[in-house]
Amino acid sequence: MALDSYFYPHDADVIEVIKNFFYIVHIGNEGAAWGMFSGHGEILALFALIALSAIYKFRHTLELHRIPMQYAFGLLIGGVIGNLIDRLVHGHVIDFLDFHFAFTIPWVLPTGRYPAFNVADCGIVIGVFTYITLSFFQAEASEDEGK
């Protein structure tokens, strides 16, 4: 069975960038991460708007006066807005980065194929990870100052 017919719909565009590892594809994701809540695009768009509003409302308590936090939230907000625009314009998010690994991990990577994603998803993940990491180190520094 050919790779294209195993992983992708018959009408999917697939460009092999690195043989058996990295592909550029065109997949419409109607859900959130890994296709969760598929078919509920309106609710996901509303959730994105609520999240953006909450970030704006609580910007003073999120330590956005610190430059590193601004970078983290810039990535997060940019990713949310990018996916929101896709959802509003196309009715789904367009995922195009597709990786296949030579190994499998049960319950995590059972086929060796990581779910396709896009640049906005990268911004969200990196922004959240950066914010959590910076928050941890800020909390640790505050404890040291209090001693």
Image: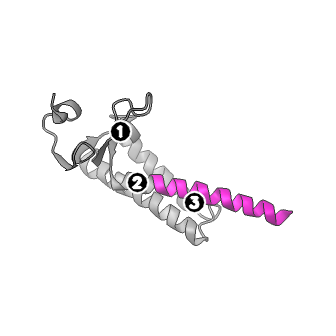
The answer to whether the residue labelled 3 contacts the one labelled 1, judged by CB atoms less than 8 Å apart, is no
Element type at mark 1: loop
Q: Nearer the viewer, mark 2 or mark 3?
A: 2
Residue furthest left as drawn: 11
Q: Residues within 10 Å of mark 2 (few under 14, many from 20)?
A: some
Give the quadrant of residue 122.
Answer: bottom left
Q: Is residue 71 above or below residue 54?
A: below
Q: Say if residue 88 shows up in the picture.
A: yes
Foreground residue among 131 and 40: 131
What percent of the width, then of the height, locates residue 1?
16, 27
Identify the residue at horizontal 21%, vertical 30% (top origin).
Answer: 6
Q: CA distance from mark 2 to mark 3?
A: 24 Å
Q: Is residue 9 at all visible to an observer of this figure?
A: no
| Residue at x 46%, y 52% (from the top left corner) | 125
| Residue 7 x/y as whole percent | 23, 33
Residue 131 point in image, percent of width and height: 57, 58
Horizontally, is 36 left or right of 72 in the view? Answer: left
**Which quadrant of the structure image shows residue 12?**
top left
Q: Start and end of the magenta stretch?
A: 125-147
Prevailing secondary structure of the magenta residues:
helix
- Alpha carbon distance from label 2 to label 1: 16 Å
Identify the residue at the far right of this view: 147
Report helix, strand or loop for mark 2. Answer: helix
The front one of 44 and 114 is: 114
Mark positioned earlier in the residue sequence (2 or 3): 3
* Residue carrying label 3: 57
Disc on res. 122: 2
* Callout 2 amino acid: Cys
Amino acid type, residue under disc 1 in the picture = Gly
Compared to 125, does 33 lie above or below?
above
Residue designated by label 1:
31
